[in-house]
Image (cartoon, grey):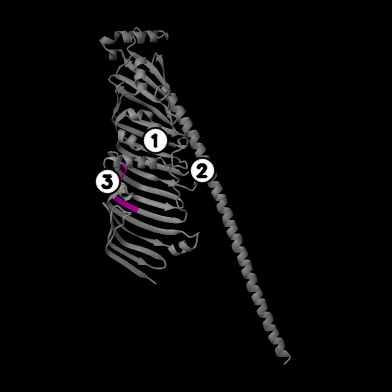
Amino acid sequence: AKGQFSMTNFIYSSDSLDYPVEIPLAEVLVSPKSFELKTLSMLLGKSDVNMSGSLENFIPYALDDGQTLKGNLSIQSKLLDINELMGYEESDYTGEEVEAQTKEDSSATDEPMETLLLPKYIDFTTTASIGKMLYEDMQIDNIKGRIALKEEKLSLENASMDFLQGSMNMTGFYESTDSLFPSYDFTMDIKSFDVTETIETFNSIETLAPIAKNTKGKYSAKMKILGTLDKNMEPLYESIFGNGKISTENILVEDYKPLKKIAKAIKYDKLNPLSLNDVDVSFKITEGKVYVEPFTNKIGETKVTIAGSNSFDQTIDYTFSFEIPRSEFGGEANEAIDGLLSKVAAKGIKVDQLETINVDVKLVGPATDPKVTTDFKEAKSNATESLKKEAERQFEKHKKELEDKAKEELEKQKKEAEEKAKQELEKQKKEAEEQLKKESDKAKKKLEEEAKKKLKGLFK
């Protein structure tokens, strides 16, 4: 049996909704095997949605806990105003109402989120094309991509969007098979994101990169990041693992206290503000600790190579290896350069013909106020290379641990699958033997009945 349902120009309003629901057109085909949504056009306040798709196996899914609901859906929208759909727009309130609503929203925000648990017996794929989406203070444009939900795993495939004054392409997944510690694994290709807007939108960035709050400009990045979340959907920093490369665009670091302390230690006043233009910075993240591989930046004629690490506990360990030409200090800085040369001479280095001052500056301790130490060298330093090797060692060590853990999990799943298959085979074998026994007993009984008939015929 099949059925068809259609609707045109339907309008629904309610006191519980701040906006009417309009359905200009809806067409549905229903059969025992499938539910086909030929078209559904909806207007939800300022938001518009056009959908089509189908559901299969919905009757067995509703009746049997072990059945999987399968489906696909295509969504197009010019505008999705999530703020309005959630029932709050700041413009709706004025005066005392704004203050009251802000307190109410703040109170609600303080409530911790709960783990987003994904269903196991759902196999659903959605393709989306959204022109503009508004959510809180964010505007995301040109959203496109494929979303697949299967066996408690939500996967994004080539999801793209314009965001934070730039654009991003993302592939990866969120998985809740472990309900206490859901996991994520994403690969991102970011182009021209604004640093300030990134920090305002994602406060965890400041935790992993404390210097960011004193930074302005844009950056592009290609990176992979994975980890787990706690029961409140907050990142467990010690579980974060990844790597990538950041390219800077007109980056300016200003009034960052550690840089000001370096400037004071080596009598070099060109570090505030510090420009990082067209610099490629490679990094690795191991257990929430960010290791920055050596990169070189020019400040006038001075070269500085920077490498080190910062941790989610807001501690840093960086080395700045400077190569400062004497000419950089200028005629008005004789006292400063004399002070530096006296420190160089104290290390037994001949300073008479020294044209370049080589000095390593270490920053170790709290990101807001680290300890500064200087080490003058006779030649160019390679201290940052040793930091790179340590980062690689930690990364490879943890990578091996993850691979071993994944291998163990794979073996475990393999054994479970083999055991399940074995049990299923035993079950089928037993059922076959029982069926064979039934058939045998039935045949035996039939033979006995036929033999009795023949005997009766002989004694007539």
Residue named by callout 2 = 406
**Alpha-carbon distance for marks 3 and 1?**
31 Å
Please report whichever mark, 3 or 2, sits nearer to the chain's N-terminal start.
3
Res 204 label: 1
Residue 381, given in percent of the width and then of the height, sits at: 40, 19
Badge 1 local density, few (<14 within 10 Å), some, or many (20+)? some
Q: Give the range drawn in magenta.
A: 127-136
Amino acid type for the residue under numbered disc 1: Ser
Q: Is 418 within the magenta?
A: no
Given the image, on which type of amino acid does mark 2 rest? Ala
Give the SS element for disc 3.
Answer: helix
Report the amino acid beneath label 3: Asp
Residue 238 visible in image:
yes
Residue designated by label 3 = 92
| Quadrant into which the C terminus falls | bottom right
In the rendered image, the vertical position of residue 38 relative to residue 458, given as above or below:
above
**Which label lies toward us, 3 or 1?**
3
**Distance in Å between CA atoms under marks 3 and 2:** 51 Å
Q: Does residue 133 belong to the magenta stretch?
A: yes
Camera-side mark, 1 or 2: 1
